[in-house]
Amino acid sequence: MSQYFLAVNHDEASIAEMETMTVEDMQPMFEAVGAFNEKLRAEGAWLFAGGLQTHDATTVVDNTGEAPVVTDGPFSESKEYLGGFWIIEAADLDAALDWAKQGSRACGGPVEVRPFQEG
Amino acid sequence: MDVIERVYREEFGRVVASLVRRFGDIDVAEDAAGEALLVALERWPVDGVPPNPGAWLTTTAARKAIDKIRRESHRDAKHQAALMISDGTPHEPTGVVDDDRLRLVFTCCHPALAPEARVALTLRLLGGLTVGEIARAFLVPETTMAQRITRAKKKIAGAHIPYRIPEPADLPERVAAVLTVIYLVFNEGYLSTAGGTSVRDDLTAEAIRLARTLRSLLPDDPEVTGLLALMLLTEARRGSRIAGGELVPLHEQDRGGWSRPLIEEGHDLVRACLALGRPGRYQLLAAVNAVHTDAPTAADTDWSQVAALYAHLAALDPGPVVALNRLVAVAELDGPEVALAQVDRLGGPLQGYHPFHVTRAELLRRLGRSAEARTAYDTALALVDNPAETAYLRRRRDQLAG
């Protein structure tokens, strides 16, 4: 079995769109993701998952110099920000892609699949 | 080509695929196949070519792979243990279903790999072409091609792209990716896009060989049969396609120079795939080519049939290129004026596609609008890299009246 990181990225446009949505608007998505998470658990593929707060809640810590530096905001200006992710276990990439297809459908956005380093 | 080299190239894909199945590692398989060639080059001139050279190469290569893995201490216990499993599967002789190669084709053409890497990997691992040969075929520096192939192999290993025939539900979509790769290889050989060569016989032959292999594995897939038929009917006209360094258009070709055996085989395959009642892009294109190769002279061409086939194709693939091809038939049926009006309406998306300008030029010529025809030939010439096609278009332009 191999481990894969399934990332859901948000850009400025999708963040702006989400901000106009009410909790009721989002409810079908929450339910679909909840059902998908249940399926991951039931089939033994689930390792971890979570949704992240928007990027303006980010703090950067850099302790590579003489003293640690703490700054507000994301590490670099980027078009896309990680919005949420799953960490799953799957037999191979085809199995991971199959989960990603279901995850993409559930959360309503594209999903990036990256294998973890091994050993 | 030397007999050992020929046998080696014919058997390469089979040997590599068998070793990939056994060792689960493309690099190990490729290196071992290369070492087996060195042994063959030493032994065969003395002992003669063995009766089953594929089995001989596979056995020799497997032994080399095991030696190598034993020498490498960094391999984990799992890998070492895999070696201890004896391989009870006999080597399959030519002609029966070769599952190892099919698995490897699907790996090479996996949608998670970049399209240009799929073509390169397929030619390398199944076709046995060297990295240098593939680089020359696609006119990129050898280091670029080596990086492309290395990167794809790393992704296969790192992301665990499986060596497996896809699940039935995924098969149609995955076969389509394989057919796209094979047709790209064929087209690059049939009308090379740049670099001073007009035709690359080795690439067309390789594409046809891969399609034949795929068909032996998936005999009931009509698009696989359709693509093989399409390539055979195109290849059949090769001998008449270029004369004196100049491309000869279909209606001017010497039909006596067409290969009858390839045409007959192609026609049989077109009938076989259409009989399955699941038409698709390659089958319809093959059927168009069957109509052309069925006509004793260009004047005998059944243009209404060609137009009907393209209309059917347009329903499946509603792009402007298919529409343009249909209008070539419309010009023969309803005259150049009717066709030109419709061609001009396709306009925009085809501005960078040279056949659009060639079609316009030919229609304008037939309408006696020489000045506009000349401009259209010039626009086409600026977009063409193939030397034989350039020579043909220049002559057509220079023959215009006025």
Image: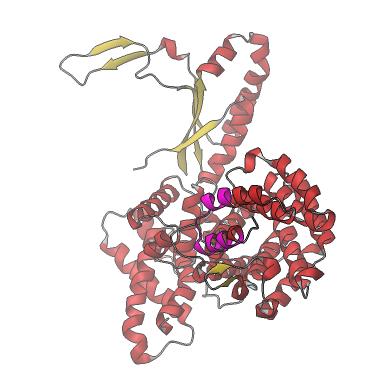
Is B6 or B17 nearer to us in this picture? B6
Q: Nearer the viewer, residue B14 or B122?
A: B122
Q: Quadrant of the N terminus of chain B?
A: bottom left
Residue under the point 60% across and 76% down: B239
Residue B145 drawn at (x, y percent)? 38, 55
Query: On screen, B110 above or below A73?
Result: below
Drawn side of residue B358 relative to residue B220, left or right: left
Does A18 appear above or below B220? above
Q: Main secondary structure of the magenta part?
A: helix
Q: Is residue A97 left or right of residue B300?
A: left
Left or right of A33, for residue B107: left
Q: Which of B154 and B212 lies nearest the eye of the viewer?
A: B212
Q: Quadrant of the C terminus of chain B?
A: bottom right
Q: Is residue B217 left or right of residue B388?
A: right
From where the camera sits, is residue B270 visible? no
Check residue B366 for magenta coloring.
no
* Residue at screen point 65% across, 65% down: B249
Residue B261: name its quadrant: bottom right
Residue B399 to residue B34: above or below: above
Residue placed most toward the observer, B159 or B8: B8
Task: Inspect this view and state whether residue B76 appears.
Answer: yes
Q: Is B392 included in the stretch rendered in magenta?
A: yes
Q: Residue at x 45, y 71 (%)?
A: B12
Image spot of residue B73 (x, y percent)? 26, 57
Question: What span is colored magenta in the figure?
Answer: B378-396
Name the residue furthest left: A66
